[in-house]
Image (tube, rainbow, N blue to C red):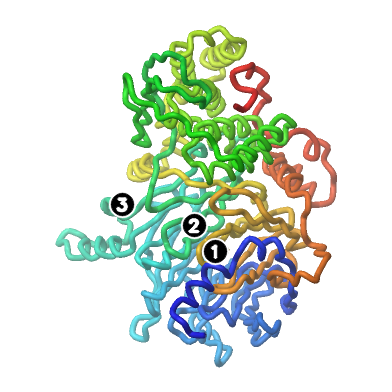
Amino acid sequence: LQERGALGFERHYHVTDPFIRRLGLEAELQGHSGCVNCLEWNEKGDLLASGSDDQHTIVWDPLHHKKLLSMHTGHTANIFSVKFLPHSGDRILITGAADSKVHVHDLTVKETVHMFGDHTNRVKRIATAPMWPNTFWSAAEDGLIRQYDLRENSKRSEVLIDLTEYCGQLVEAKCLTVNPQDNNYLAVGASGPFVRLYDIRMIHNHRKSMKQSPSAGVHTFCDRQKPLPDGAAQYYVAGHLPVKLPDYNNRLRVLVATYVTFSPDGTELLVNMGGEQVYLFDLTYKQRPYTFLLPKKCHTSGEVQNGKTSTNGVSNGIHLHSNGFRLAEGRAHVSPQVELPPYLERIKQQANEAFACQLWTQAIQLYSKAVQKAPNNAMLYGNRAAAYMKRKWDGDHYDALRDCLKAISLNPCHLKAHFRLARCLFELKYVAEALECLDDFKGKFPEQAHSSACDALDRDINAALYSKSDNAEDKKGGGPIRLRATGRKDSISEDEMVLRERSYDYKFRYCGHCNTTTDIKEANFFGSNAQYIVSGSDDGSFFIWEKETTNLVRVLQGDESIVNCLQPHPSYCFLATSGIDPVVRLWNPRPESETLNGRVVVDMEGASQANQRRMNADPLEVMLLNMGYRITGLTSGGAGGSDDEDSSEGQVQCRPS
């Protein structure tokens, strides 16, 4: 109809929940003879490019399932990235490969028109930006981000960012992407848990000023004497990961960002963290990691506990240094907890019943559903924290800590949230802070000071504090742990340490998939309003979550081995995936008349638990599993792996309110 509101309507409704629940396989595009490692839609969405281990790139007409063009790229190893150059009429295609080369191809004549050989290790990703015509960027395992200029008079590449200047010679860049709304911002994923966001303009201006300086001499973008200017880089990290790094390293578990992408409106950054979960960072409302905690003394009449109503409450005065979040000391007004409307009360009761049946994930999803509708209800956060602490998947104790703090901010006299907070700090290895928090709990709730749960946690904390195997200095505060996380302190520059200390925490976490076997696994926003999150997995499935609730809503079998790539169509409910199989698969909502969808994974909970066990398994066991052997320890027991079962919760913690 070409009406003004038509585009907005289409964008809002082209990916909806009923469509997601009917998503199924439409077609398989066959033409490659090796793993398909990368996919890329053109801007219109009528072309799809793929790159493969067979060193060929194929351009498809995906709407008619036709192969339009196939060409050998000139690479001598696996292709890892393929991109259409903006403003080229879909004529220019760029590829990066394991031969350390970046090639530029003219599709109209099926020729490679330029080859860049500046990298010294595998090229993992290419990025483009509409605002920068004739320009693109590459990330490679030599630790460099290079910028390319294709203008006729200056076809060249130069170093934009040298990560080795900050992190030592072993750092590898794995992925990068440009903000679609402000092309001056470039996000980079590399070895380790930190994701970096750079201001390209500031870096260029810094380089110009260095060149103009009389004493500048010869410089690169990241000169040792003149690092990136303040404000040119921001770091993002899941708050619990720096503390977990030594443990992960001891178990040969590698943390590496395998994919980064911005939301369509450019306000959020999504990261698939290899060896861990998928994380979403809010670039507008940033928050510091919840890792520096100093409870202040507080007294209460005890009239408000566990989220129940009172009119005479007192703040606990918790001061969160790194997040700038402070509850005033002394007396403060506690707003009464509003009763939940009947439909949310039913959801809460369903969650409580799931908790009682030890269905932790089901309970978490129900609490999350209620939290989205009632974001100021302390009891919901406190109950969800209890479910996280019982489930014990990677990152659950940190999410529980966040929920406890939220519950306490809403109701400073929430008894169970206070106690769970101390337990979370202990489980996260903040032992001294846990002791301080527990002492604060005893002073605030003296009637609980000698409960079995309190005594048990007290014993655990003191045992950890005085254990000879415990390095007391490293456990004492969050700062030293975060700085020394890599175990290669001498190779990390002072500037890098400062940037890491200033890093921002995540907003949402998505669990269920497994990302340990390949380092090109993607996660993407699905829908123009980014309503859903999709990710590949080592079990051959791909997972779909609701963005706002983080609830898993769909799991589909997308590959015989591993799903690596997921690229949503720019304007339809249409998804292209690929992995180890030499095919590209296309997914869309299937007709209601189709009753059977053989690729649906019905037991999403079982698949998620198996993936959590897989992530915590010994790497040798995983290798044997991939070879077809069944390992008893990998296929039995509780999910979560590294945390010991906590039997000391007692009446304070074990039941939701």
- Going by the picture, which residue comes out furthest to the front? 342
Q: CA distance from mark 2 to mark 1?
A: 8 Å
Mark 1, residue position: 124
Q: Which one is in front in this view, the residue at disc 2 or the one at disc 3?
A: 2
Residue 456 visible here: yes
Disc ID at residue 453 = none
Query: Where residue 493 sits: x, y (%)?
Result: 36, 44
Q: Is residue 486 left or right of residue 31?
A: left
How dense is the environment of label 3, judged by Cα within 10 Å: few (below 14), some, or many (20 and up)?
few
- Number of marks in picture: 3
Helix, strand or loop at label 2? It is strand
What's under tag 1, amino acid-wise? Lys
SS type, badge 3: loop
Question: What's the amino acid at mark 3?
Answer: Arg
Q: Observer-nearest residue: 375 or 452?
A: 375
Which residue is located at x 51 percent, y 58 percent? 260
Q: Nearer the N terminus, badge 2 or badge 3?
A: 2
Residue nearer the viewer, 116 or 372? 372
Residue at the location (53% across, 81% down)? 44
Instruction: Determine crowd level at label 2: few under 14, some 14-19, many 20+ residues with C-alpha closer than 10 A.
Output: many
Neighbours of disc 1 within 10 Å: few (<14), some (14-19), many (20+): many
Pointers 2 and 3 in contact (CB under 8 A)?
Answer: no
Instruction: Name the residue beneath numbered marker 3.
Output: 224
Q: Residue 460 in the image: x percent, y percent?
A: 58, 15
Cα distance in 3D space between marks 2 and 3: 19 Å
Residues under numbered marks 2 and 1 in contact, where contact means CB atoms less than 8 Å apart: yes
